Image: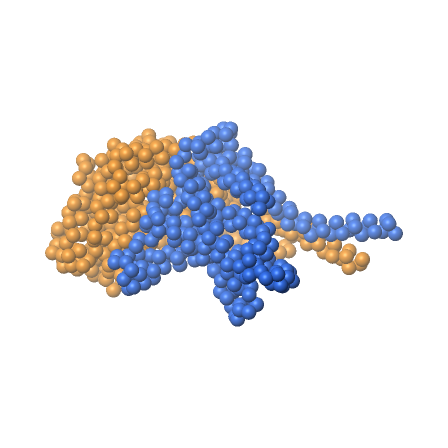
Amino acid sequence: MVRFQLKTKEKKILIGWSMILLAALFIIVFSYIPMVQAFFLSLKTGKGANLTFDGFSNYKRMLGDATFWVTIKNTLFYAIVQIPVMLFLALLLATFLNDPGLKGRGIYRTCIFLPCVTSLVSYAILFKNIFAVDGLVNNLLISLQVIDSPIGFVTDAFWARVIIIIALVWRHTGYYMIFYLSAMQNIDGSIYEAAQLDGCSGRQQFLKITVPMLKPIVFLTSVMALNSTLQLFDEVVNLTNGGPGNATRTISEYIYDLSFNYVPSYGYSAAISYVVFLIVVVLTLVQKGVMKER
Amino acid sequence: MRRKSWVLFFALVLSVSMIAGCSRGVEGDDTDVTGDSSSEQDAKDQVQNEEQEDAVELTVWGWDAAFNGLAMEEADKLYEGAKINFVEMGKADCLQKIHTTLASGVTTDLPDIVIISDLAVQGYLMAYPGAFKPMDAVIDYDTFAKYKKDMLSYEGVGYGVPFDTGVAGLFYRTDYIEEAGYTQEQMQDLTWDEYLALGEKLAENGKLLQTYNSNDISEFQIMLQSAGTWYTDSSGQANFSENAALKESIDIFKRLNDSGFVKIASDWTGFTGAINGGEVACVIRGSWISSVIKAGEDQSGLWKVAPIPRLSVEGATNKSNQGGSSWFVLADSKNADVAADFLKNTFASSNELYNTLLTEKNIMGTYLPAATVEAYGAEDPFFGNMKVNQTLATWLSEIPAVDTGVYTAEAQAAILAVMPGILDGDDVQSALEAANDQFNQMVQE
């Protein structure tokens, strides 16, 4: 009897492995092995195919590369401004849409989630048209007599950043809202009932019950948002192409330029990619620490 | 239990067959046909059929099917020994794909011919030694415009077959400039000061001179080459802070920026929209722009072309170039020799081909013997019966040759990075020195 059970267990393990085997193999071959290769590549210098092993010189080169620091600064700026705004909005929307008394919840949810399924490039082009010199927003502002002459939204450093952040918030808020919504639906309703019996106000319920219960999801979403913002590419390339000057250029765009627009420095681009990876790891650990403290 | 065994069995079969499916694609094993889509099969049959007919299929990677693709199609009609398969991609995608393919070192499934824009050519030749087939023994470079050969040569060896030229012109609306009190004679051989003065005059009648995008300095290429200079010197070093032509170009750019007579266009759509919508009187670009201008059919007969404005620095001319690209044979492609022979017999020797291309799409090659073909004498009703092709062709030989070197993209990015500051009133000299430092950072090995 014991032997038979063991056999079942073995079989279960075998079935489990056989099911993930393929996916695991693909991940190893197409993700982990290239990551290791990229690290070795980051230790090489040279243009195009003329690569020679040169230790950590690419990492040293970064220290003096002004464009690299500008792009790091821009990317972190997006992360610091956009992520809190977006996650707060997502949480707020989720709270409203979680209210069972609200009519037409499904429609609102769909509408807010809809931007997430649009293609990155096409929505960026759409935003570019809306904020063009003779685009919708400028025409509207002029006809409302808010401004006299059109604002060059994508050619002005300040406005270009604002537009990119607005675009990002518009596109991604619905996505994170869904995470919060599903998490909220997992909170046991009896907790709220008990709280109400104890005379807890709606605001207190939100701050003392909903938010703490959502902590793991807040952590998950902030890591995810950070990850995607640090890899920001499509929106910036299509909206402003990094301009004016380098005012909106992100690390990913710089990596792309170094590999494909300029005479390719594959080693140096790989090194910068590794730095981005390290930044993500460090920031994730910091976030994790902060969440634990609370 | 029985059911579980079946699940296990299917899961294993599925995994194994899919893995086999992957490896099959890499190794090209034809015996396993599971998962082979019918279109792949069709393509294979087609290739086999063609091989039986002794016609080789040459794969060409390029952008713009209506321009480069059309040229290949017309060339294909003139050549017996091969069939052209033009694979169209976006320009950036195409240039990137050539990079990734060559960098990966893969030699199977390469295209036979690729098109590369002239300013990027040196970078490719330097980055991938041995990837492109030397063409000195195949074609006679002396039959092409001299500047083209310089751009396609690396360490003294010629690669690639020169294709189109971007001989630059000042395309203008005759009705708008006449309204501003200018005659067509006055539009010939302007200086930039005179050109900007025209802008003031146009503005009085509520017309705009040209488009302007603070984030696009491609007009610098035209200005620099018209004075026989470039962003970089012959040793590949940045030529910024001592470059009088560059400083004048920046000054003109700033004056356009501060003026009230330009149409702000932040992208291609805005740019072409301003031209076709009749919002601007002039556009200064390579000759390829004529296909954009001609898209505004309602403006037929209203356009003319004049030489571009001249800088005031020493050696400045009214002739320049912008854009243009060339064909390259990949040395490791299966049909490299056929591909080279194809290019030799078409783009490097056929007047007939260039005649067709000129007639069909105003595509102007750099093959000098073709300067006598019929299409050059043709009057173009769109340009008020002007012999546009002939006019542009006579300028072709007067374009100052410049060594554009390897690092044009880097140099342009470095200048662009300091432009917002300059437009805000920063000192040009110190900004250019900063750009120089930035350039040196970018071009490190």
Give above or below for B88 relative to B147: below
Which coloring applies here?
Answer: by chain
Q: Which residue is rendered at x = 11% and y = 56% of the image?
A: B181
Letter of the chain in blue = A
Q: Which residue is rendered at x = 41% and y = 44% of the image?
A: A74
Viewer-nearest residue: B318 or B194: B194
Viewer-nearest residue: A109 or B429: A109
Q: Is residue B274 visible?
A: no
Judged left or right of residue A45, residue B385 is left
Give above or below for A285 relative to A105: above
- Residue farthest along the front direction in this orientation: A199
Q: Which residue is rendered at x = 34% and y = 62% of the image?
A: A136
Task: Residue A125: give x, y in percent of width and height.
Answer: 40, 56
Task: Residue A170: give x, y in percent of width and height.
Answer: 45, 57
Judged left or right of residue A13, residue A182 is left
- Residue farthest along the bottom direction in this orientation: A103
Task: Residue A217: give x, y in percent of width and height.
Answer: 58, 52
Q: Specify the quadrant of the image occupied by residue B297.
A: bottom left
Viewer-nearest residue: B76 or B275: B275
Q: Specify the quadrant of the image occupied by residue A246.
A: top left
Q: Is residue B430 visible?
A: yes
Give above or below for B180 relative to A69: below
Q: Which residue is rendered at x = 40% and y = 40% of the image?
A: A70
Letter of the chain in orange = B
Judged left or right of residue B368, residue A179 is right
